[in-house]
Image (cartoon, rainbow, N blue to C red):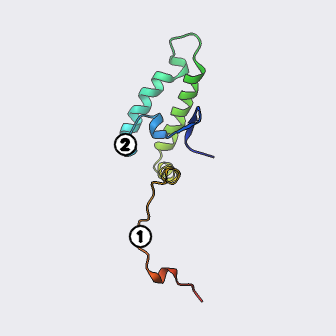
Amino acid sequence: MSRTSTTKGCKISHYDVLQVPRNATPEEIRKSYQALALQYHPDKRTSTMPAIDETDHFIRIDQAWKTLRDDRLRRIYDAELMQQTEEYFVNEVLTAADFERDQ
């Protein structure tokens, strides 16, 4: 199951959904979530019939918040996101001894 939202064929990260940078603090994420949740919440809509796209967007906002507010889930998500975008790196130095086969 992919943890990025898909909108009309393009993937949007949880950070994009919540309109915060990847290095955002939990407080910045919370504030953005609250503002967007108020804006897109179906019960807060002023029109009599909420647009389907806006309801879907609220669901994506809620999913992003549930992932990014939890430190463990956020680290897992960040690792998956880096792997998908191929922006990962090895954070350890390997030596020839690391590649020797145990007998």
Extreme residue in the right direction: 1
Quadrant placement of the C terminus: bottom right
Q: Is residue 60 above or below residue 95?
A: above
51 or 6, nearer to the observer: 6
Instruction: Give the amino acid at mark 2.
Output: Ala
Q: Secondary structure at mark 1?
A: loop
102 or 38, nearer to the observer: 102
Left or right side of 8 for 91: left
The residue located at (58%, 27%) in the rendering is: 56
Q: Secondary structure at mark 2?
A: loop
Extreme residue in the top direction: 48
The residue located at (45%, 54%) in the rendering is: 87
Question: What's the mark number on residue 92?
Answer: 1
Question: What's the mark number on residue 24?
Answer: 2
Question: What's the mark number on residue 18?
Answer: none
Left or right side of 6 for 69: left
Q: Is residue 79 above or below residue 20?
A: below
Query: Spatial distance from mark 2 to mark 1, Cα to Cα?
Result: 26 Å
Residue 73 in the image, given as x and y percentages of width and height: 51, 49
The residue located at (53%, 51%) in the rendering is: 84
